[in-house]
Amino acid sequence: AYEISPKTMVLGSIIGTVTFTAIPSFLYSVDVVLWISVILLGLSMAPTFPSVYNLCSSYMEVTGRISSIFVISSAFGEMII
């Protein structure tokens, strides 16, 4: 089985998110492009949190307390956005 490193996954998620956010800005009059971009944007954003969590666990010991801080701060960031 082929494994992708967490760094590569986070980088791919960021590139996909920026790309599929920018595409509808240029082709906003085509509905199909908008829907395809929204679908691909969701697929590129989905692995971001687990990949960052996995990346953090490779640099430091992730305990229950640190994990709860990650989850609470990510939920707070989502509410702000």
Image (cartoon, grey):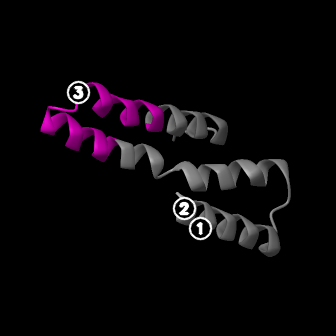
Q: Which badge, 3 or 1, comes first in the chain's sequence?
A: 3
Position of residue 73 in the picture relative to residue 48 (left or right): right
Residue 31 magenta-highlighted: yes
Q: Which residue is mark 2?
A: 78
Q: Residues within 10 Å of mark 2 (few under 14, many from 20)?
A: few
Position of residue 35 in the picture relative to residue 49 (left or right): left
Residue 66 magenta-highlighted: no
Q: Which x, y percent locates residue 13?
A: 51, 39
Q: Which x, y percent locates residue 31?
A: 14, 39
Tell me: residue 21, above or below residue 54.
Answer: above
Which mark, by number, is residue 5? none
**Circle 3: element type:** loop
Q: Which residue is mark 3?
A: 27
Position of residue 56 in the picture relative to residue 78 (left or right): right
In the displayed orientation, state which residue is furthest to the right. Answer: 60
Asked whether disc 2 touches disc 1, contact meaning CB atoms under 8 Å apart, the reply is yes
Tell me the magenta residue range: 17-40
Q: Which badge, 3 or 2, comes first in the chain's sequence?
A: 3
Identity of the amino acid at label 1? Ala
Give the overall secondary structure of the magenta segment. helix
Rendered residue at 75%/69% (across/down) = 69
Residue 4 shows in the view: no
The answer for how far apart the CA atoms under marks 3 and 1 are is: 31 Å
